[in-house]
Amino acid sequence: MISRAALNPRVLDAEYAVRGPIVQRAQQLERQGKQIIYCNIGNPQALGQRPLTYLRQVLSLIEYPELLDAPATRALYPGDIIKRARLILAQQPPGTGAYTQSPGLPFVRQAVADFISRRDGIPADPDHILLTDGASKAAQAVLQALIAKPDQGFMIPIPQYPLYSATLTLLGGQQIGYHLDEGNGWQLNEQILESSFTAARRARQNAVGIVVINPGNPTGAVLTQDNIEMIIGFAHRRGLAIIADEVYQENVYRPGSRFHSFARVLTDLAEREVTLFSLHSVSKGLLGECGHRGGYLEIRNAPVDVLAEFVKLQSISLCANVPGQLATYLMVAPPQRGEASYHRYQLERDAIFEDLRAKAEALGAAVNAIPGMQVEIPAGAMYAFVRIELPVAGHRTKSRSGDALAEATAREASYCMALLEKTGICVVPGSGFGQQPGTLHFRTTFLPPRDQIQALVDRLGRFHQSYLRSQKSALPRLRRSARSDATGCR
């Protein structure tokens, strides 16, 4: 029988906190009958967000085309839905049960290019677009293609979505962290970028690219155009490619904030040297179709022979799943004004957006009212990265290990596990994303139903105060124990 020790050490070293030990414990408790509120992952429909009728209606007809000729179909489906399904099947006669071209269905890639052109007012080439099994597969493909040597790596934000650190570990690449500026709304700071790059060089780590998540996960920040211009300029000077993870581009809530795509800013700057990899997904935005695993990768400023290698890499997996490709098409080609399904589509999207906006504001305001907690009210995305203050109760652990990072990680994990056990609220420790030394955080979504948000925060506040009291009362015992250990009188 194979043993764990026989596995690839890179697999053993890879970590993915959003589905780590705390989530596994949550699943155990759920099986035992405890009610769990899963705030650990951006999984909208699992937390009650309804799917868009338009998307599900079209997909249902494509999955079972015999419905198109059924007499009852015209009573159940608007005319434009039936027309759209027939157009898709004309482009893809086998429906969802056959492989497609490796880069994806040509008409979907064209629709993505048209979407980018409408969004940004810039040209987009369908030959530079690949359809992928969600944005995660797109990001992994870029990292795999660009990490050519063991000393090479990517600059990744701290805090970051752990897909990037886990994938770099699997590939044997270098993780070059740069800290986001928590005091400045989690924007990127040019001095921090330069310091991170220079420190990596001194450590003989060769950065070949930089990852930017906008809007931010786990921070909820939305980058300004000036900040994006700075990042592109930095990448140009340092010879870096950019991965622009833009899966939350529709999730911008704060008045005065808006999403600026890297593709548009790159074009406005007439930047032709920096290679840009832009990611988008049906999992986030206002669709929340996580289970359909659809997304795209757009590549700019790359020669034809490089594009061919990405197509080859995609061909090794044959193609992205076809329902996900079609979900991507329906994301970028929604109903148009005057079509029968347009009004319902707009009502559903507006309701989802307003619900998310209100929950982001409510969660942020309520958390900031809890003594010992603070958070930048999310301007976008689906998460809040909550900073917590805890008493340093781990003197004994610290004196033995001497590892401040390990101690902070253990304190966060203990806190989040206790929160789960006492309240059923499942969040992710900040150490799973990275953070400034000396700070403690956890990440939570604000996806639960609106009527549960206040109850969730009330429960969180009561737990936090109770936890602080228990930790403070433990300090004298820990100090006495530490003195006993030091004198050998235990």
Image: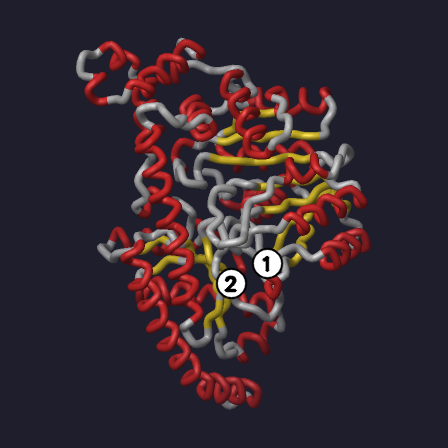
Rendering quarter of residue 55: top left
Q: Which mark is residue 186?
A: 1
Q: Is residue 56 left or right of residue 222?
A: left
Work out whether 321 lies above or below 24: above
Find numbered disc 2 in the image and state the secondary structure of the residue it sits on: loop
18 vs 77, nearest the viewer: 77
Q: Residue at x 66, y 55 (%)?
A: 188
Q: Is residue 94 left or right of residue 213?
A: left
Q: Mark 2 belongs to which amino acid?
A: Glu
The answer to whether any part of residue 150 appears in the image is: no
Farthest residue to the front: give it: 338
Work out whether 169 lies above or below 63: below
20 vs 357, nearest the viewer: 357
**CA–CA distance in space, label 2 to label 1:** 8 Å
Work out whether 249 lies above or below 405: above
Residue 74 at x, y percent in the picture: 22, 17
Which residue is labeled 2 in the image? 376
Residue 123 at x, y percent in the picture: 64, 26
Q: Mark 1 belongs to which amino acid?
A: Trp
Crowd around label 1: few <14 · some 14–19 · many ≥20 (10 Å): some
Label 2 vs 1, first from the N-terminus: 1
Pointers 2 and 1 in contact (C-beta within 8 Å): yes
Residue 216 at x, y percent in the picture: 54, 50
